[in-house]
Amino acid sequence: MQKTRNTRNNEKRYSFKTRVLIFFVNLFLVAVACLGLYILFVFLQMPSLDSMLHETREPAIVFLDRNGREIRSDGRIMGMPVSVEKLPPHVWQAIVAIEDKRFFEHGAVSYRGTLRAIFVNLFHGKLAAGGSTITQQTAKNIFLSREKKMSRKIQELILSMWLENRFSKNQILDLYMNRISLVGGMRGIDAASTLLFGHGANEMSVAESAQIAAMLKAPTTYSPLKNPERNIKRAKIILAEMVRQKYISLDEARAAAQQLKAVNKKIDKNMYRYWTDFVREEIESRIGEINQDLYVYTTLDTKLQKRATENLVSNVGDFQGAIVAIARDGAIMSMVGGDDYQTSQFNRALALRQPGSAFKPVVYLVALENGMTPESYVNDSPFAIGDYNPKNYDERYYGGITLATAFAKSVNSVPLKLTKEYGIDSVLQMAARLGVGNNLKREYSTVLGASEMSLLDLTTIYSVIWNDGKSVHPYSIIKITDAGGHIVYSRNPSEEITILQPQTVEYMKELLYEVVTKGTGKRAYTSNVFGGKTGTSNDNRDAWFVGATPNYVMGVWVGRDDNKSMGSKITGGTLPATIFHEIVK
């Protein structure tokens, strides 16, 4: 009976242990099931794995100058695609050497690197080292969210394993190099190289590769643009690692170390913004809706644009200004819409303002077509028609003078008398032939430039004269291609139409030359200026100068956005003529 009692006690004892064991086993299974369900829930919240590899964004437009050099990109967030196979080896080797030296040996996770990071962090008592592999960093870069949540870390791990199973190591490295964000909000080492060094990743030197790789840890902290000393210090560490891992020789590392330098380049594309805004509207008028990445080859001369921008900014002071330069065939070589795009995006080269006396060549062309010559005599005396009785600028009258002298001194009575003789309709028709007749009023005040027009329109008038009297249609786009180089649009020049007869053109050029050598435009003259004309609107609100050089016709406007007077000292023959002179000399 004693034996039976002991057996029953043992059974009770064992059943208790068994029940505890079963409880913990069940608890473990429940925990595993819950964890599995949580992981499944997190996985189901992930976007399509394939879709993560293709970023959704607005179509990008890359603007190039007349020589095919990129001047600005609009909407582009990534550089040109790069790959391990096509890059110089030292480019990707610098990245692997500092970010994940065992990248080609481990899987999605480097357990050795993770353990080392844990020990380092415990020793320092803070997060002093990370254990992420390049694959894990690629996963991070594919996610738009950088939230430090457990769910995101699980998604990152899932994606890392998926990347390792789907792609080769070289392909993962390609993804990493094309997705990493380093400078200017753009992605990819090619974008960073272009912005910092002026060329793509395929042209990077060993030194430049080390400087780019140095930024991977913290782009702003180790930027050669913002923190050059930190960048160079870390780049030297990378060069040492590249030697240690036998990617480059010690001599190559020493030579590269001598080439490390700060990037002093100011990444400022302000001087192109008015232009690219203008071109973008032209794109839409040519091809309609923009639904793919485009490369737009424009007519811009970047050297001329730089000179125009710098001289406008340094001279306008408290006023505003605009500049347009047009080649003989109508190609717009320069357009500056103001002195600071960041302050105001309003393009003043397209604003309608009163051209003042800069409109007078239209009237004189009518007179020349009707048989007058620069040596024909006219009478400069007070003029009135009804209540309209404008005076000369200095209220001085010269009496009997030649047409050339009247034009050079920009007297007001003579063009008004010429208009009365030949009819105001003939003046408006001449303006229409020159391409700028749409906004002109049928009034005598139009003769003295009271009807508004843009600087682009005004410069077009003069372009016709220096295109030997043939029609000029300003254009800004040579061709447009897609990302693959296929032509989407190509300019098809229209046939030139003869608007002015050769003799009329020669006489007009003679009159314009007199203005810059003897008349109101003398401040604009240099040996390569063929002629020009000044213009000043009522109360000195607008001041203009339009002149010609061997390569282009350039118009300059100076004024105020509030349309108030600039004061009697500012006329077309002062500030605009000076700016023109400084640009073309």
Image (cartoon, rainbow, N blue to C red):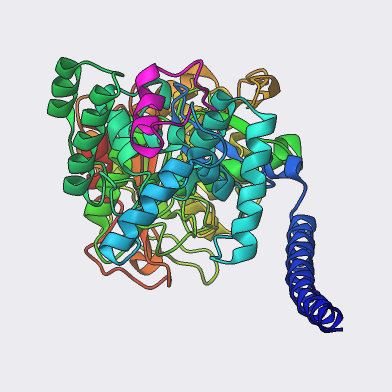
- The span shown in magenta is 77-104
Queried whether the magenta region covers residue 260, the answer comes back as no
Residue 264 is at least partly visible in this image: no
The x and y percentages for residue 273 are: 46, 48
Q: Which residue is farthest front? A: 1
Q: Quadrant of residue 493?
A: top right
The x and y percentages for residue 444 are: 55, 58
Q: Judge whether 404 appears above or below 69 on screen.
A: below
**Nearer to me, 131 or 403:** 131
Q: Judge whether 131 appears above or below 341 on screen.
A: above
**Nearer to me, 141 or 158:** 158
The x and y percentages for residue 180 are: 48, 42
Quarter of the picture containing the N terminus is: bottom right
On the picture, is 243 further left or further right than 448?
left
On the picture, is 100 further left or further right than 404?
right
Q: Quadrant of residue 339?
A: bottom left
